[in-house]
Image (cartoon, helix red, strand yellow):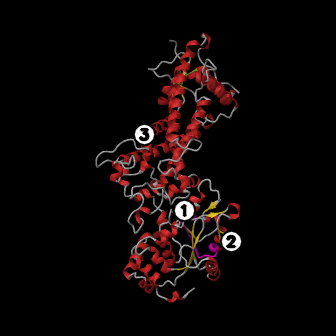
Amino acid sequence: MNDSNEIELRDVLAARGISRRQFVKFCSLMTATLALPPRYVHAVVKALDKTTKPVLVWLEFQDCAGNSESMLRSGHPSVGDFVLDLLSWEYHELIMAGSGHHAEAALDRVVNECKGNYICVVEGAIPTADDGVYCTIGGKTALDIATRVCSNAAINIAVGACALDGGLVRSNPNPTGALGLSEAVPGLTNLVNLGGCPHNPVNTAAVLVHYLTFHELPELDQYRRPLFAYGNLIHDQCERRAHYDAGRYVEEWGDEGARKGWCLYKMGCKGPEANYNCPSVQWNGATSWPVKAGHGCIACASPRFWDTKSPFYDRLPKVPGFGVDVKAEEIGWIGTGVVAGAMVAQVVGNIVRDNIKPKDTDGHNHPPAN
Amino acid sequence: MNRAIHAAPDLPWKATTPDQVRVYVWEWPIRFSHWVLVITIISLSITGYYMHSPYVTARGHEAYVMGWMRFVHILSAFAFLLGMMVRLVWFFLGNKWAHWNQYIPITKSRLKGFVAVGKYYGFMAWKPVAYIGHNPVAGFAYLVVYAMVIAEILTGFAMFSFVVGSPTLKFFIGWLPRLINIQYLREIHFLIMFGFWMFFIHHIYTAILVSIEEQSGLMDSIFSGFKYVPEDHLAHDLAETDGPEEAAREAAAVSASSHKPAA
């Protein structure tokens, strides 16, 4: 695409003030995130040194740009710094200098000239209601752009909950008919979903590094999410797990348990039903993550989490057909009470019947025959 | 399945009334699965409710309350599964009173009986309808219970597959979390527990009621397997399901074996 293809990565990094030591540390982080043995660090360093800056386009549809922000502000030096230098970012609305027709021309050029060789990252949901008019860029609908760009990409990476399955945009009642990339453009076989609200940039970088090193996608689960990031329950990696097993729980915000860092299970933490590597990779240069900061997990990396994991501060979802304030346990206890009451009424009724029945009705009837 | 049903010899310490015969109704797998389900439903409810909403405050540095609750719950779950599997097998290998067709009121006589029993419970009849096995309403209630047991097993093991990540378990149950979100599986699993409690209250009540009204040793029968039923009643029961010829043969066997010496 441009002259930077011939410039060595270490020179580019040096020009940005990133030392060789920091680069190797980044490679170690990537290797560890991918759950590869340490001997692979060498392979990753070698492969990244030799990359010839593959082209990357970053498409934004119905989004809040939160995933772009997460990528760009992840630490010092940020994961984004490395990824920006490893790849040639030809199109990314949030950060590109060009605008209008110039920007769209850049995207067209990538699709036409690098067909089958570029990496496509998708952020945001894709509306399908009313012919997709709810999100258009340069007069083309998100669906048209995604179909054209993603179908010709070497690999597609859907970042964030909205690109995974529609996320917030798709949550009930979904007026724009929003869908995630895998449903809006079915049949993409080279797709990696990186759910999360936002995606964790370390995981996204790790997928890119895995592709640049091994020229294939990491192993995926049934939602096409990489197993290295979505293979384990949050609950099993949580630093508050010991309090859960012991039986020490935060009962209300700000109580003794909250101050002592006890388990947030009773506050509706969805860690026990969420798969993500949030507790181990963490955020902002691995300083913290939600549960460490004292708030329960909302399972933001799980499919359809707005609809299926809410209310975020209750253990269980609302029971369909009952009011929003009615909890499952209230329904259960009231139902049990009603049955107990009915049985008491039966006992009274039987005592009355036994006392008033005529003399010749002792004994019992035979079952009716055919 | 069609093993010969006959009256058992009387017990020396337990007198029957002159017209009653002692019949082996509930075979050991039925009683085994019954008591396994009783014990596990109690232990699963106590531990399961804690797992939903921890009601014990842990004290001390060596507390492991949730850990033990989960251990007992998972252990009970496997016993629960075993109990239900034994019962499922006995739907097909057991005697006529344990056979699967006793639970689904689709034959004409079972449907009529369903109405007749319903009338008694609705205070529209003076006399109860006596069945040696389950009456059609009871049978249907147990069908609902067995359905709840199976639903609890499926939802429970689906949640367990999240915890253990076993490929074998995922192979058997992995389809379920794809159909229904894990949170709703959790909710179904929790709500069905109350279904067991409702059934529990109702079951104890009807067991006591029928024991009193029919004087057939119904309460004893879930321990010993034997019920005490009028001789003509057994003949009637056999005629209903086995056809006249076989019933005559069986009735003859019954009267021969239950011959009593004069008091």
What is the crowding at mark 2: few (fewer than 14 residues within 10 Å), some, or many (at least 20)? few
What is the crowding at mark 3: few (fewer than 14 residues within 10 Å), some, or many (at least 20)? some
Which quadrant is home to the C terminus of chain A?
top right
The chain holding disc 2 is A
Which quadrant is home to the N terminus of chain A?
bottom right
Dot 1: what SS?
helix
Under mark 1, the amino acid is Ala
Please state the horizontal and vertical placement of residue B237, each as a whole percent of the image.
63, 26
* Residue B156 visible within the image: yes
Observer-nearest residue: B71 or A226?
A226
Dot 3: what SS?
helix
Residue under pointer 2:
A139
Kindly identify which numbered label has been placed on residue A161. Answer: 1
Left or right, B125 with respect to B263, comes to right
Instruction: Tell me the CA gap for discs 1 and 3.
Output: 37 Å
Does residue B89 sit above or below B251 in this rendering?
Answer: below
Question: Could you confirm whether marks 2 and 1 are on the same chain?
Answer: yes
Please state the horizontal and vertical placement of residue A91, each as a whole percent of the image.
57, 77
Q: Are marks 1 and 3 in contact (CB under 8 Å)?
A: no
Q: Are marks 2 and 3 in contact (CB under 8 Å)?
A: no
Instruction: Tell me the CA gap for discs 2 and 3.
Output: 61 Å
Q: Which is closer to the viewer, label 2 or label 1?
A: 2
Q: Which is closer to the viewer, label 2 or label 3?
A: 2
Left or right, B61 with respect to B124, comes to left
The region drawn magenta spans A149-164
Please state the horizontal and vertical placement of residue B213, each as a whole percent of the image.
55, 20
Please state the horizontal and vertical placement of residue B256, each as a whole percent of the image.
58, 21
Residue under pointer 3:
B46
Q: Is residue A226 found inside the magenta-colored segment of the image?
A: no
Could you tell which of marks 2 and 1 lies nearer the N-terminus?
2
Q: Is residue A161 found inside the magenta-colored segment of the image?
A: yes
Left or right, B70 with respect to B263, comes to left
